[in-house]
Amino acid sequence: MYDVAIIGAGVTGASIARELSRYKLKVIILERKNDVSCGTSKANSAIIHAGYDAKENTLMAKFNTEGNPMFDTICKELDVPFRRIGSLVVAFDQEQLNHLQILYQRGMNNNIKGMKILTEYELKTREPAINKNAKGALFASTAGIIDPMLLTISLMESAVINGAEYFLDYEVQSIEKQEKKFKITGSGKTIEATWVINAAGVYADKIHNMVSKPEFKILPRRGQYFLLDKTEGEIVNSILFPCPTKMGKGTLVTPTVHGNLILGPSSDNLDDPEDLSTTEEMLNLARTGAKKLVPSINTGKSIRNFAGMRAVADTGDFIIKEADDTPCFIDVSGIKSPGLTAAPAIAAYVIELFREKGLELKNRINFNPFVKRKIFMELPPVEQEHLLKENPLYGRIICRCENITEGDILDSIHRPVGAKTLDGVKRRCRPGMGRCQGGFCSPLVQEILARELNVPIEDIVLETKHSYILTNKTK
């Protein structure tokens, strides 16, 4: 019997799990995929938004504003790369310049600090590669870039270090509300919990409807991206946005914390939340939008195209509340952009909801807020020498593109929430993220996974349960 069951191990569910692990509670996280951070949390723009875009008096505005300043402490505690490089919304004509004033005033209403309207000269001084037709921009200094996959994984590790449990490959099939508990049935053993948190992303409406009358609908919206080689990573200094439209913030151009460049996303509404295919039409739209901002971008340097799915609620806002007719069932749904930015503030708010509803929250005296990780080639020489003495495998390079060693890969497998798949290793320490996209290192990583997990190499999958790489020997 658990105090709280969280459905969904994306950045929102992981943030809530970590906050709950501060207290003497029995918490379990249920995830339908075979790893954490496998949904929207792994395929997004990797941006911490400043907060001027969300409309006043919405939950999006509230939690964006509260969440943004929390990232300095969180990323320091969790050892996650994070840089405040600022963002620019670029205007190309008088109508768009007028819209910048609207965004600026909205930001002021949302209590966003560090904003300024830049003149054409100031914009082009800051961003020399910007389109020569640009006329000005709204600058927001508090915007930043992050590794969202590593953030989610580290949040989960922190929760597990502090006592939370988790089940992967657990697809919830039914939820029954009993007198003082919920009975959750899925592709694993039956779970009983006093409280349930629905953080199921694009499936949040289906989870809600298992136990409560329909209150909202989730509309899956796909976004497609280019990831460019590190040779393109210094073309821009800031996160660049066009003026937003009703479909979203538009095609952006941004550096990543690892030195690449991301272009995207496109935006199309789908019925199938599992359709993460990329299409020529939508990628061309993303390319055109990016080149309007920075004409010199060379999309021929793309090393990967990918798509992510956003969970857009038909309510037009985040849904964070107890279900109307089901006490102790809390929806945390419709968490699209700026959901990544909002996640830590949403988690803090959920804790306050629990207090208001009477859940006893006793502090865990030995709560450990820190998660430490290391990448051998990023360490000072003294620490490298010490690690090599402990384990010589830190001296064997596996991924030449990203300079990842066998020791790094072993660490990713044997961590509190360790990797079990090829992409799981990639999310934790980046082999396969470089120019060759795993062309050289993938077979070696498969061998290491098979050895460390003590399974046949044919059982190692790329990502999802049946995405087998090897079937049998040819000779």
Image: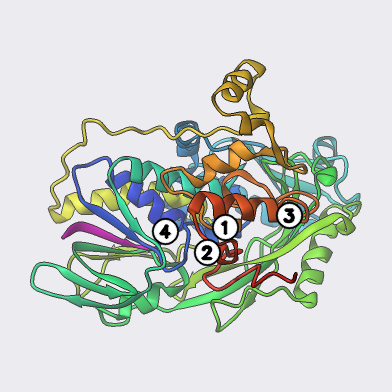
Q: Are marks 3 and 4 in contact (CB under 8 Å)?
A: no
Q: Is residue 68 left or right of residue 198?
A: right
Looking at the picture, which amino acid does disc 1 mark? Lys
Q: Is residue 306 left or right of residue 62?
A: right
Q: Secondary structure at mark 3?
A: loop
Whole-Å distance between the Cαs marked 1 and 2?
Answer: 6 Å
Q: Are marks 1 and 2 in contact (CB under 8 Å)?
A: yes
In the rendered image, residue 124, in percent from the top left (x then y), is placed at 85, 40
Identify the residue at horizontal 54%, vertical 46% (top origin). Answer: 150
Q: Nearer the viewer, mark 3 or mark 4?
A: 3
Which region is colored magenta?
1-7
Which quarter of the figure is the C terminus placed in? bottom right
Which quarter of the figure is the N terminus placed in? bottom left
Examine the rendered structure and indicate whether residue 445 appears above or below residue 169: above
Q: Secondary structure at mark 1?
A: helix
Q: Is residue 224 left or right of residue 294?
A: left
The residue beneath circle 2 is: 39
* Label 2 crowd bin: few (<14), some (14–19), many (20+), radius 10 Å: many
The residue beneath circle 1 is: 42
In the rendered image, residue 8, in percent from the top left (x then y), is placed at 39, 63
The residue beneath circle 3 is: 438
In the rendered image, residue 181, in percent from the top left (x then y), is placed at 14, 67
The residue beneath circle 4 is: 9
Examine the rendered structure and indicate whether residue 212 appears above or below residue 405: below
Mark positioned earlier in the residue sequence (3 or 4): 4
Q: Are marks 3 and 2 in contact (CB under 8 Å)?
A: no
Whole-Å distance between the Cαs marked 4 and 1?
Answer: 11 Å
Looking at the image, the residue that sits furthest to the left is: 179
Identify the residue at horizontal 61%, vertical 70% (top origin). Answer: 468
Whole-Å distance between the Cαs marked 3 and 4?
Answer: 26 Å
The image's mark for residue 226 is none
Looking at the picture, which amino acid does disc 4 mark? Ala
